[in-house]
């Protein structure tokens, strides 16, 4: 961690003594906040393990008394009972998400590098567009967006879930802030040694930008994995649905009440990959977030 | 490509050689991204503006007829759901944004101290960011179909509930619900505040301590003024995040207008009213804060 201690505690040797009250209160407060923040997660895990009779007890119960894995097996059977097996949804989600993340990282890094390190004419205008795009909601443009995708003939294919989400303003912004910090002298040295521009970008700039694009990859993964809005609009074929969309149809269907446990299990399964990805990249992400925060 | 043509004309003639070559290289790098942003962002934006002022006469090729403000009139005076939903979202935003800012600042200050388990707390408060918005968030915060919230029957034990009576219990419950939602939406803000706190020079606190300032005084006289740029940034971020959030009833309604009612023109008009309001709110926040923001030469 780059985080440095801002100041040293005043009397270091008395730290143990001070731990008694104010420290205790601090920990108590923080733990309380963590518990409140963690409650939805905890409830989700419990719900996914609850047998049916426990789900509808009044008053509702938070903690599961007789945990069961029935919900998970129900989930598999109820989703697979149609022509599409459950694993297909997982594959759809994984494939489109990974493809989007890879393409987005390369395209956004290339663009940001070009803008930050070459300062082309008109870079001010482009950056203004990026900043404006940051504050737009996708919902404003959903219909025209659908029309564009439709006209390109991408509706109801994997491409509809990948191509529109490659050039993202947020990713561009994040990498660009980092590119500004790249020392020109290294790039210049490579150019003098006769490296082609793309070579400079790929073998020198990209490794240096690694913290930025790993963070970007994590965020992009999480966003695309959780996104059920674009599959909802662009995908109608059952075989191409992604996991969140399949879950949504599951919880919105006729048998909503009877399936509360199944939905709980499904929600739990959907959150697992995001948490895994973050767990692997934790250090990098926290570092980058703090760093870019200062700069923007 | 027209951008590039225009740009090279503007350049001074003398430096054309290397500068022009580098501009060209830059645009080669930028082209994939530019195409993407033009096709999937800029063009839809303009179509959406046009749509909000017109009536679709033919879907084939999207032929439209200019009708002026008719769509806007419709959503304000004829649509019974738009105004109440809109007001509710505005109220929610106005309530949640200050709560969010205060909470995340307090948490950031607490976990910025040197203490055992700092990494754990930082991660714990950041995890909600990962689970993102949209459907999962809805499920997790219990805003799903059955209408019960996450804290129903959990936070307030029966005994206390009986003692307090229904109305007070409801208030407490509502408050707890709101805190949970706010905590879940302040992960990014906490990290940004942490970064800001670590940017404050330690010597300031050292000097204040030598002069006999208490922790409380140091917070109001050093921490708060130094962190104002981040506060402003966080306010803007929070407003935008609340407005673009998938769990937002207004977003739901616009979606319904589009895909269930198929009133594309009105939906476009609604989106624009909604978006412009978010911009106005951000602008107001920036104007109000500007006088109080500590300027260290950095932008924002």
Image (spheres, rainbow, N blue to C red):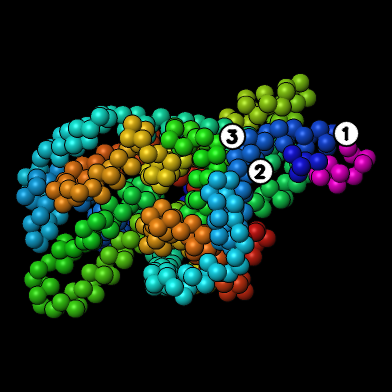
Task: Return the residue nearer the eye: A239 or A267.
Answer: A239
Tag 1 subunit: B
Q: Pinpoint residue A190: horizontal percent, then vertical percent.
A: 72, 25
Given this view, does label 2 or label 3 mark the residue nearer the observer?
A: 3
The residue lying at 53 percent from left, 49 percent from top is B59
- Judged left or right of residue A187, residue A35 is left
For residue B23: magenta? Answer: no
Residue A107, numbered circle:
3
- Judged left or right of residue A235, residue B222 is right
Which secondary structure lies at badge 2?
Answer: loop
Segment colored magenta: B6-17
Same-chain check, marks 1 and 2? no
Q: Pinpoint residue A16: horizontal percent, then vertical percent.
A: 30, 57
Quarter holding residue A33 = bottom left
The residue lying at 43 percent from left, 55 percent from top is B262
- The residue tagged 2 is A180
The residue lying at 21 percent from left, 61 percent from top is B148
For residue B15: magenta? Answer: yes
The residue lying at 13 percent from left, 48 percent from top is A258
Residue B17, numbered circle:
1
Given this view, does label 1 or label 2 mark the residue nearer the observer?
A: 1
Q: Pinpoint residue B56: horizontal percent, then vertical percent.
A: 55, 56
- Judged left or right of residue A88, residue A120 is right
Tell me how far mark 3 sits from mark 1, CA to CA: 27 Å
Tag 2 subunit: A
Tell me how far mark 2 sits from mark 3, CA to CA: 17 Å
Which secondary structure lies at badge 3?
Answer: helix
């Amino acid at each position: 961690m780059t985080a440095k201690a801002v100041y040293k505690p005043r009397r270091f040797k008395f730290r143990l003594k001070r731990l008694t009250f104010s420290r205790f209160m601090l920990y108590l407060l923080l733990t309380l906040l963590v518990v409140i923040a963690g409650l939805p997660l905890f409830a989700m895990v419990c719900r996914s393990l609850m047998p049916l009779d426990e789900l509808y007890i009044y008053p509702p119960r938070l903690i599961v008394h007789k945990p069961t894995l029935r919900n998970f097996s129900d989930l598999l059977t109820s989703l697979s009972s149609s022509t599409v097996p459950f694993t297909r949804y997982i594959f759809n989600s994984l494939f489109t998400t990974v493809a989007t993340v890879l393409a987005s990282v390369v395209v956004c890094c290339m663009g940001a590098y070009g803008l930050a390190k070459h300062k082309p004419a008109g870079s001010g205008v482009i950056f203004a567009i990026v900043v404006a795009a940051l504050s737009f909601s996708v919902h404003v443009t959903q219909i025209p967006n659908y029309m564009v995708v439709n006209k390109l003939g991408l509706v109801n294919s994997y491409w509809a879930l990948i191509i529109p989400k490659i050039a993202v303003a947020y990713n561009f912004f994040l990498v660009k802030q980092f590119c500004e910090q790249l020392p020109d002298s290294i790039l210049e040295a490579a150019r003098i040694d006769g490296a082609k521009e793309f070579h400079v970008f790929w073998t020198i700039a990209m490794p240096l930008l690694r913290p930025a694009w790993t963070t970007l990859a994590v965020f992009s993964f999480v966003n695309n994995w959780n996104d059920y809005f674009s599959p909802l609009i662009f995908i109608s074929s059952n075989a191409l649905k992604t996991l969140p969309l399949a879950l949504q149809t599951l919880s919105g269907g006729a048998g909503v009440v009877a399936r509360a446990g199944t939905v709980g299990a499904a929600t739990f399964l959907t959150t697992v990959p995001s948490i895994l990805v973050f767990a692997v990249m934790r250090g990098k992400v926290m570092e980058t977030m703090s760093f870019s925060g200062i700069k923007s | 490509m027209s951008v590039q043509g225009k740009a090279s004309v503007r350049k001074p003639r003398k430096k054309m050689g290397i500068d022009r070559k580098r501009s060209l290289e830059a645009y080669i790098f930028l082209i994939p991204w530019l195409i993407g942003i033009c096709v999937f962002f800029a063009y839809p934006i303009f179509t959406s503006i046009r749509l909000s002022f017109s009536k679709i006469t033919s879907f084939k090729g999207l032929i439209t007829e200019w009708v002026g403000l008719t769509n806007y009139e419709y959503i304000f005076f004829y649509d019974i759901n738009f105004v109440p939903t809109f007001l509710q979202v505005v109220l929610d935003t106005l309530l949640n944004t200050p709560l969010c800012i205060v909470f995340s600042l307090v948490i950031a200050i607490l976990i910025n101290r040197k203490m055992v388990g700092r990494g754990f707390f930082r991660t714990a408060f950041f995890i909600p960011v990962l689970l993102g918005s949209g459907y999962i968030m809805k499920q997790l915060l219990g805003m799903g179909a059955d209408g019960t919230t996450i804290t129903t029957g959990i936070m307030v034990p029966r005994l206390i509930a009986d003692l307090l009576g229904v109305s007070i219990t409801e208030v407490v419950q509502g408050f707890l619900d709101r805190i949970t939602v706010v905590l879940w939406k302040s992960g990014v803000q906490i990290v940004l505040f942490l970064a800001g706190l670590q940017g404050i020079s330690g010597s300031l606190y050292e000097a204040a301590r030598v002069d006999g300032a208490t922790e409380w005084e140091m917070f109001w006289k050093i921490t708060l003024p130094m962190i104002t740029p981040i506060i402003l940034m966080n306010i803007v971020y929070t407003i935008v995040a609340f407005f673009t959030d998938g769990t937002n009833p207004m977003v739901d309604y616009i979606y319904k207008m589009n895909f269930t009612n198929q009133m594309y023109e009105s939906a476009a008009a609604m989106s624009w009213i909604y978006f412009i309001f978010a911009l106005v709110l951000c602008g107001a926040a920036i104007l109000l804060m500007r006088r109080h923001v500590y300027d260290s030469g950095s932008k924002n």
